[in-house]
Amino acid sequence: MGPVADPTATAPKQARSRVTRRHLLEAAVSCLAEHGWAGSTVSVVAERAGVSRGAAQHHFPTREDLFTAAVEYVAEERSTALRELFHAGPAARPAVVAALVDLYTGALFRAALQLWVAAGNEEQLRPRVTELEARVGRETHRIAVELLGADESVPGVRETVQGLLDMARGLGLANLLTDDEARRARVVAQWCRMLDATLPDPAGPA
């Protein structure tokens, strides 16, 4: 009987592989947000991540694999951060609405938007982006319902939450061209008033 392989021997290699994968995903989102689909290739991402093109293709055989995985990875990271920000559950409504809007004003949203545009012209990319957007959208909706303390069994509540997310997406689009912070703050305040009129106060009576 030969020597028994030490399972701990592969641990450093696996750890390095996870780090390399994370660097590639983060670099892919940055490239997509800054340069768009046309300017974001596997080679460009690999160079930014500090790895070889071969190493990048070992983790992600195709360009579509890399960029859809990158947007999904960062979306999951943002969802986790949002839940941790309000780890106790429903919180003050203005803070929740502002945090949800912030999801659509950073590099992740710009990268996702570039994927959407590319999917309109790239047949091989379209089904993957469609499925990804549906999955991320469902998760964001669940988080919004949880943090707002919304009861979707009440008629109109689901549509109100979805309207909030649609509004947040629209504010993210407006912010791509100009710094829209002042107008965004006014819109967020108005949405909070609308939510107060539609949803019960998650914090309960004062």
Image (spheres, grey):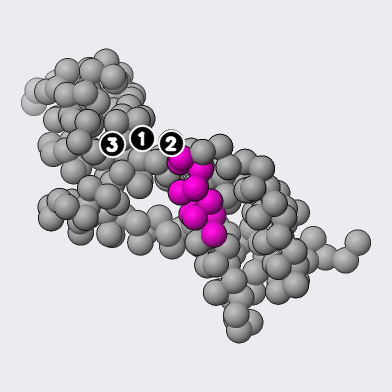
Rendered view: 95 above or below 161: above
List the single residue furthest toward the bottom.
Answer: 155
Residue occupying the far front of the picture:
178
Up/down of 65 relative to 155, above or below = above
Query: Residue 182 versus residue 154: which sits nearer the camera?
Result: 182
- Towards the viewer: 169 or 46: 169
Is 15 colored magenta in this rendering? no
Residue carrying label 2:
107
Evaluate if marks 1 and 2 touch, with contact meaning CB atoms under 8 Å apart: yes
Mark number for residue 36?
3
Which residue lies at the image location 91% right of the left edge and 61% below the top edge?
A: 206
Q: Would you identify the image quadrant in which residue 123 lies?
A: bottom left
Q: Quadrant of residue 129?
A: bottom left
Instruction: Tell me the kind of residue under disc 2.
Output: Ala
Quadrant, the N terminus: top left
Residue positioned 17% across, 52% down in the render: 121
